[in-house]
Image (cartoon, rainbow, N blue to C red):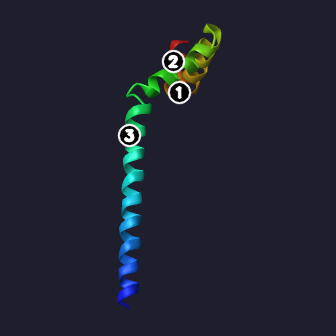
Amino acid sequence: MQKNAAWREAARSSNLKRARLTDEKEEEEDMKDKAPSFIRSQLNSAASDLTVEQRLQSNKKSLQRSHGFMEKKFTSK
């Protein structure tokens, strides 16, 4: 029983050490690889793929899907 308890304690400490190292490595990668402007750069690269005409069509369609679009057009007629 004593041997088993010592073995379990050794396994537990090695597991904790491995988990701590993994956590530290993940935190290091998060800090190093992704700047706070990560999302902005992704959006800019996606927007640069679209032409001006495609962006205008997209904006037009999103406006038409909005709630107040039909009411505005109806009241202006």
Marks 2 and 3, how far apart in space? Answer: 26 Å
User: Which residue is under mark 3?
Assistant: 28
The one of 21 and 39 positioned closer to us in this rendering: 21
User: Which residue is under mark 1?
Assistant: 66
Confirm or deny contact between disc 2 and disc 3 (CB under 8 A): no
Marks 1 and 3, how far apart in space? Answer: 43 Å
Residue 68 rendering spot, x and y as whole percentages: 49, 25
Report the mark closest to the observer, 1 or 3. 3
Q: Is residue 31 above or below residue 63?
A: below
Q: Residues within 10 Å of mark 1 (few under 14, many from 20)?
A: few
Indicate the secondary structure of the residue bearing disc 2.
helix
Left-right relation of 40 to 59: left
Residue 44's tag is 2
Image quarter in which the N terminus is found = bottom left
Q: Residues within 10 Å of mark 3 (few under 14, many from 20)?
A: few
Left-right relation of 47 to 27: right
Q: Is residue 70 above or below residue 34?
A: above
Residue type marked 3 = Glu
Q: Is residue 45 above or below residue 26?
A: above
Indicate the secondary structure of the residue bearing disc 3.
helix
